Image (tube, rainbow, N blue to C red):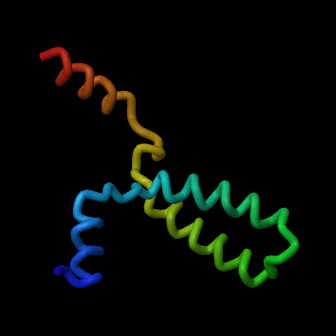
Amino acid sequence: MKSSKQWRKDENKNVKLPNHSEDYSCLKVGLKWLEHEKEFSATQLMLIRHIRDVAAQKKPSSFKQKFITDYIEHIYKVNI
């Protein structure tokens, strides 16, 4: 019989982890909800904001401005 640790390893083998963009989006929505709840202190909200900001810094560079030549190169490669 497998130990509980072994079962957890097997269960998590094929789990797809969320990317940084998904993390950021979830934290952003969660933070909006938390801000409207009265049970959370300012310290707790600051911690969640910090975690959200870290996720934002790790988002892919697709949100950075690109040059028009980047798109031309992509179109050229696709049409070959």
Q: Residue at x 44, y 62 (%)?
A: 58
**What residue occupies the far top of the structure in this picture?**
79
Residue 78 rendering spot, x and y as whole percentages: 20, 21
The residue sitting at the front extreme is 1
The residue lying at 59 percent from left, 66 percent from top is: 52
Q: Which quadrant of the view contains residue 37?
A: bottom right
Q: Residue at x 40, y 50 (%)?
A: 61
Looking at the image, which is closer to me, 22 or 70?
Answer: 22
Query: Could you tell me how many numbered marks the image carries?
Result: 0
Q: Quadrant of the C terminus?
A: top left
Query: In the picture shown, does residue 66 fall above or below 42?
Result: above
> Between residues 48 and 57, which one lies in front from this camera angle?
48
Relative side of 79 to 38, left or right: left
Left or right: residue 69 versus residue 77 is: right
Judged from this view, the residue extending furthest toward the left is 80
Query: Would you identify the image quadrant in which residue 79 lies?
Result: top left
54 relative position to 19: left or right: right
Q: Quadrant of residue 66?
A: top left
Residue 31 screen position, x and y as percent? 70, 63
State which quarter of the image contains the N terminus.
bottom left
Q: Position of residue 47 (x, y in %)?
A: 65, 79
Q: Position of residue 8 (x, y in %)?
A: 29, 74
